[in-house]
Amino acid sequence: MTKIRAERLAAQIEGDFVVFLIGARINNWWRFRDLYWFSKTMPKMLKELSDLPADETGFLGYQMLSMFANVQYWRSFEALETYARS
């Protein structure tokens, strides 16, 4: 079992970086198919980003918040925008 660390930790990185919160929610129960689509595509995108070298994409990592939301860390906004438009 993983030991819980009761201390404040911070990453050290030179320069700026981007924290991108991405997720989905259902506003209407009959739109469940949209959430199903999101739950299928998000893991594929995260796997693709994790498999590519960080110096190519600018993707530094991610943290899951829930089944339908995660936080992504990027080197710059330009790197995030380049991936989004590709």
Image (tube, rainbow, N blue to C red):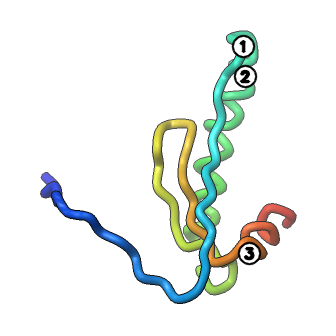
Of the 4 image quadrants, the one containing the C terminus is bottom right
Between 40 and 73, the one nearer to me in the picture: 73
Identify the image quadrant of residue 7: bottom left
Residue 16 screen position, x and y as percent: 61, 80
Q: How many angstroms separate mark 2 from mark 3 (CA)?
A: 30 Å
Q: Which mark is residue 28?
A: 1
Vertical placement of 2 versus 37: above or below? below
Q: Is residue 7 above or below residue 51?
A: above
State the CA–CA distance, disc 1 to disc 2: 11 Å
Q: First in sequence: mark 1 or mark 2?
A: 1
State the residue in front, 17 or 67. 17
Across and down, in percent, residue 5 comes to 17, 60
Q: Is residue 47 above or below residue 28?
A: below
**How busy is the neighbourhood of tag 2: few (under 14 within 10 Å), some, or many (20 plus)?**
few
Mark closest to the chain's N terminus, 3 or 1: 1
Residue behind mark 2: 33
> Which type of secondary structure does the marked residue at label 3 adopt?
helix
